[in-house]
Amino acid sequence: MTFGWSGHSDLTDLFSYTNRSHSNAPDSRSTLMPRLLVHTAVVMLIVSMSGCSGMKYWWHNNQMVGPNYGRPVVPVANDWIDSQDESIIVQNGGIDDWWRVFNDPVLEHLVAAAYQQNLSLRAAGLRVIEARTQRQIAAGNLFPQSQGMFGSYARNQLSRTTATASTFVPRAFDDWQLGFDLSWEVDLWGRLRRSIEAADAGVDAEIENYDSILCTLIGDVAATYIQLRSFDERIRLAESNIEKQSGSLKITEIKFREGEISELDVQQAKANVADTRTLIPSLQLQRRQAVNLLAILLGVTPYELEPMLAAAGTIPDAPEQAIVGIPAELLRRRPDIRQAERQIAAQSAQIGIAEAELLPQLVLGGEIKLNSATFGGLFDGSSVAGAFAPGFRWNILNYGRLVNNIRVQELRFEQAILAYENAVLSAHREVEDAMVQFLKAKEQAIEIRKSVEATARSVELVEIEYREGEVDFGRVFVLQANLVSAQDRLVAAESEIAIALTKIYKSLGGGWQIRTEQQYTGAYPLDNLALTQSPELPTQEMPGDAPEFEPLTDDSSTTNLIESLNEVRRAIEESKAGSTELPAPSEASKRSEEYHELKTEDDDYLDSSGDTDSRDCESLFPVSPAQEINVPAARTPLPKG
């Protein structure tokens, strides 16, 4: 097999020196060609390196061109705006399993069920496995990219009427071949290693995407459940008011029959009852929609979940104070921020890949085979033939395409930095919005509660006065309607407090830590949920021949995605140590348990300087400080090298 320029001309000898076992004795031209090849390669190396990162940088950078990645520095706030409020407690770390502050067992079981059965989360787990497989493909490219066996048979017959016809060569003969060939591009400039670096960052980004979806999922389950319970409470209050208003209606009817009042009071009392009754269908509709949304989040059908949540419940009690971390912890706790940072690292490696395209590629190729005119002589020692064909390829005269591709990658890198900065700013905004919503909802609830208490007392007094004939029904009508409205607004405000608290903890990056807890990673049965307010939650069953997604039922499950991710880590460590063996995907990658247990070893993610559960978003393929180039936050073009 020959590499370089192809064709039957002297250019083949110039750009690809081939040493064949059956070649003739070298002549003056054949001795000159290898020298030209060596001299040309040396000139190419000097010229190419003088125009790129420089020989010294290339050598001290593990023989790789392109910049080394360093996390950008982004500005973070020193404190929260409302940190001095007595309802906000600032402490390092925050709360990871924040849904437990509501002390609602049904909510805790819903979170566990959603974590184990949500389909979007499973799809995110599959993307992690896909990224891991792509990383293995990138690592495999370090080795000979093409190798294979070949074999052929041909029956040949030569013409006797051509100018080259010879009577000394048999006109008809057979040609038997059996051999092995390979092609190997040597990673001289680090193009393939940069591809592995990008794939490593891609695996990290998919893990962070999984965690981000998990945080959002838990927050949505909690908020939807709180809304569901608020509808229960509003329906209960409406029914209670209907009962009281119906009692007032009976009094007006009795008085009307006795001639004490006019029909106007009766009609006003009927209007009050009818207006309050109109609230119930609307609230029941919204409750049903909340159950339907919960069903989707849990990965079951609404028909299965509705009977399980049919029993009414109360709004979970939100604590008086919210425990938050410091703003700087957002960079470590928020998965979406860590995902954006990992995408910068992946794009940084793409710059090195693009720069390597400017340089010549050294390719080693060859073949060894058995070649004979007869099948019987195919396995004789004299039938062994072969070729060793080193060569190079150099993309020249590309009219700026390669240089502009480097610029494209640099611009994408700068865009990724801006996206990272925007993610940090958006995270600050979400936390501040949730905090002020929590505080103002508490203030609003206090005033509405005072209004409800005053209105309720007014209704009691006016009903007594009405029965005694001291006032007409007009005042009763107005105060009863006001009480219905005030009580409904109070329930909405109380639910707003609880929902705002869920937003605070979700915006702080709490929730993804659930996958590191033993009770959620295989030891949390869903078929024995001892719910205090509703029966056990259903598990999903797939019809027909669809793949089975069984919930995790014990902590003796064979293997899961934890093992798969640990294999990724071991592969990366082995590649840095020069290992040539990649781990094969485990059988566990085919099981549904993998989609949920993405836990990696704590020392890869825990902050070494603190005692929190926050993960450090360093790459799984880190660079040493000596190789690191810190990227400034300013929007300046990235220098080559």
Image: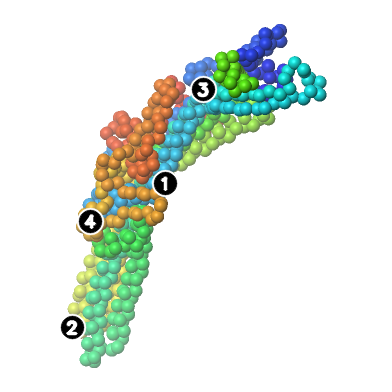
At label 2, the amino acid type is Glu
For marks 4 and 2, give the one nearer the viewer: 4
Q: Quadrant of residue 18?
A: top right
**Callout 2 secondary element:** loop
Name the residue located 31 percent from the left edge and 74 percent from the top edge: 276
The mark nearer the N terminus, 1 or 3, is 3
Q: What element does badge 4 sit on?
A: loop
Where residue 349 sits in the image (x, y, percent)? 50, 30
Circle nearer the viewer, 1 or 2: 1
Mark 3 surroundings: few (<14), some (14-19) or many (≥20) residues within 10 A: many
Cβ–Cβ below 8 Å for labels 4 and 1? Answer: no
Q: CA distance from mark 3 to mark 4?
A: 59 Å
| Pointer 3 or 2: first along the chain | 3
Q: In the rendered view, does 131 fall on the left or right side of 504?
A: right
Question: Which disc number belongs to residue 64?
Answer: 3
**Residue at coordinates 77% horizontally, 25% vertically from top-left?**
159
- In the picture, the disc for residue 531 is 4
Q: From what the image shows, is residue 393 above or below residue 273? A: above
Q: Nearer the viewer, mark 3 or mark 4?
A: 4
Q: Which mark is residue 123?
A: 1
Image location of residue 23, percent across then percent down: 65, 13
Sequence-first tag of 3 and 4? 3
Q: Which residue is mark 2?
A: 468
| Badge 4 density bin: few <14, some 14–19, many ≥20, Cα 10 Å | some
Task: Tell whether 157 sits left or right of 427.
Answer: right
**Any part of residue 430 in sight:** no
Q: Position of residue 256 (x, y in %)?
A: 25, 89
Relative placement, left or right, of 224 versus 636 is left
Quadrant of residue 516 within the rendered picture: top left
The residues tagged by marks 3 and 2 sit, at their Cα atoms, a distance apart of: 96 Å
Q: Amino acid at mark 1?
A: Ala
